[in-house]
Amino acid sequence: MTLAESLRQRLEGAIAAGRLEPGSRLDEQEIAQRFGVSRTPVREAFRLMAANNLVELRGRQGATVRSIKAQALIEMFQVMAELEGLCARLAARRVSQAWGAEIGEIHQRLVATGETGDIDVFYDINQEFHEAIYEASRNAFLADQTRKLRNQVAAYRRRVTRMPNRIADTVREHEAIMQAILAHDPERAHSAMRDHVNLLGDNLLDFLAAFE
């Protein structure tokens, strides 16, 4: 891994964690000083992130974390729901007993964290659960494309997690997804995951109300 790629990973992690908000400016010199590197790998990291639609390069104004308008974001969530649904469908067909146990263990940690109300830890374990299903699909290309889109909307997915009652809903929906996968029921797994990720009904209205 090059220095620029390492920086890209760390900056993308900061965006996904909400430490770098959509619309915030990335100061090339400050980042170079913080990580003890020259500005050249920082610029390259910005270009790599721009290629993944995570930042916008604005000439002399530098780089900013990409902001997504509400309508575009809803469309991205729709596509995300179908990609994750396909991951769940394939996982239901291909999951091994050992990997099923791993998904179950992650889910139990999610339940325990949900009871504490620690949203940041809950979100991280939630990501682990989804990542385990990407891997269980045994389709590397699908997993890679799903991660790329997930990273683009990560900051906004975190906002969804903070919506009222979302923790309890997530635990219940994950339980349904997991049971469908462990029962090797592809149709039910796809449907449960799609509905879990997509912004529908009251969840959509609540998200739009809090979007600004």
Image (cartoon, rainbow, N blue to C red):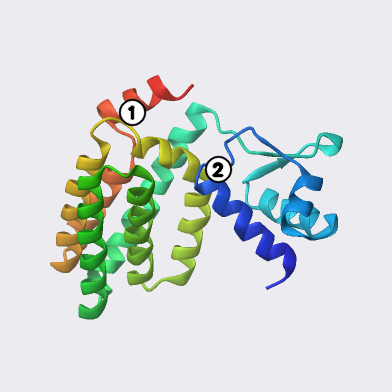
Image point (51%, 33%), residue name: 72
Left or right side of 40 for 82: left
Dot placed on the residue nearer the N-terminal end, 2 or 1? 2
Q: How many marks?
A: 2
Q: Which residue is mark 1?
A: 204
Q: Is 94 in front, or is 101? A: 101
Amino acid, disc 2: Arg
Other-residue count near label 2 (Cα within 10 Å), few / some / many at <14 / 14–19 / ≥20: few
Q: Is 122 left or right of 152, judged from the image as shown?
A: left
Distance between mark 2 and mark 1 Cα atoms: 24 Å
Residue 199 drawn at (x, y percent): 34, 35
**Which is in the foreground here, disc 2 or disc 1?**
2
Residue sitting nearer the eye, 108 or 186: 108
Residue occupying the point 24% across, 71% down: 93
Residue 74's image quarter?
top left
- In which quadrant is the N terminus drawn? bottom right
**In the picture shown, does residue 104 fall above or below 115?**
below
Q: Could you tell me if the residues under marks 2 and 1 are in contact, i.e. CB atoms within 8 Å?
A: no
Please report the residue visible at 42 percent of the width from the left and 41 percent of the height from the top.
158
Q: Is residue 35 above or below residue 195?
A: below
What is the number of the mark on residue 19? 2
User: Residue 33: x percent and y percent?
Assistant: 78, 52
Residue 191 in view here: no
**Circle 2 SS class:** loop
Q: Position of residue 163 (x, y in %)?
A: 32, 31
- Give the SS element for disc 1: helix
114, 85: nearer the viewer: 114
The percent coordinates of residue 14 (x first, y second) are 57, 49
Q: Is residue 145 above or below residue 208?
A: below
Q: Amino acid at mark 1?
A: Leu
